[in-house]
Amino acid sequence: MIESQSFRIVLYTVYILLSRLALCQREHYGSKINMTDMLMLGEQVNGFNFNEEPIVKYRGPYFDTTATKNVTSLVGKTGHLNCRIKNLGNKTVSWIRHRDLHLLTVSESTYTSDQRFNAIYNKQTGDWSLQIKYPQIRDSGVYECQISTTPPVGYTMIFSVEEPITTIPGAPELYIDLGSTVNLTCIVKHLPDPPLMVHWTHNNQEINYDSPRGGVSVITEKGDITTSYLLIQRAQISDSGKYSCLPSNANSKSVYVHILNGDHPAAVQGANLIRSLSLNALILLLIILAHL
């Protein structure tokens, strides 16, 4: 009888230890652990009912690991890192930048001189968001959302800042025969959002597609890569000049169009080269005269 009671005491002690271990694991990892499954002893062992008392009466703070760990933003466009926490209680939340182990925020207070960083708390969702205004490429890296438990527990996230790339095939100069169709293509590679608008200018002036000249149109296709086509039918000498593609969320790109009236491109390039050499020669002459 004494041996049976001793066995039950030992068994209950083991059960309590395993319960505490499960609690620690659940606090740290936010995972659900079924003690009955762990023990594989069923609901009763030697007459002891494990369901008489709850295993855990309180669960400490833990992270909702379904939150996105990888966040991408465009240069200059405000980014948000969302950290969702359950059962925070009286603990505080901090944001740390791993690159230099810099403490950025504690609760909703900013602890850095860089005022682009702010902590925002959403009471309805339990989200603690790190807001980064006007992000630059240098802001890319690992950030940690940390809870002030003992020891502290953290959830790391990767913030990537991308700069969209704008290209015009054939740039910087294109040569088109008089009367032909000018087809300019602007390609914008972007993450994560396409540009809302793509504008075209001619010699720094907005192109009027309804002008009496006619024959000028633009087609823009949006997707993972945005492509905008500027079509100018029956090219005229007055259509020569600088054409610029201006996406709403990316850098602009320009191309110089030369309308050839029977001239060979090589002749045009040669004339441009002569003008360039003449200018360089003049600059060199001025430098020499200045040192005499």
Image (spheres, grey):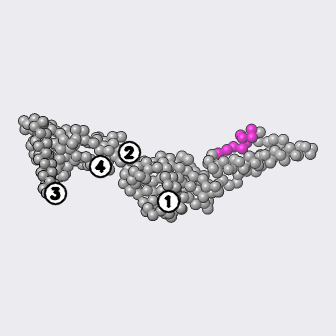
Question: Earlier along the polypeptide chain: callout 3 or callout 4?
Answer: 4
Question: Earlier along the polypeptide chain: callout 1 or callout 3?
Answer: 1
Does residue 205 appear to the left or right of 138 in the view shown?
A: left
Residue 208 seen from this side: no
Does residue 143 appear to the left or right of 18 in the view shown?
A: left
Q: Which residue is mark 3?
A: 291
Q: Residue at x 22, y 38 (%)?
A: 170
Question: Earlier along the polypeptide chain: callout 1 or callout 2?
Answer: 1
**Residue type, numbered disc 3:** His
Q: Which residues are magenta?
A: 32-40
Q: Which residue is mark 1?
A: 104
Q: Which residue is mark 2?
A: 191
Q: Which residue is mark 4?
A: 251
- Secondary structure beneath dot 4 equals loop
Between residues 60 and 122, which one lies in front from this camera angle? Answer: 60
In the image, is residue 39 above or below residue 121?
above
Gap in Å between the C-alphas at discs 3 and 4?
42 Å
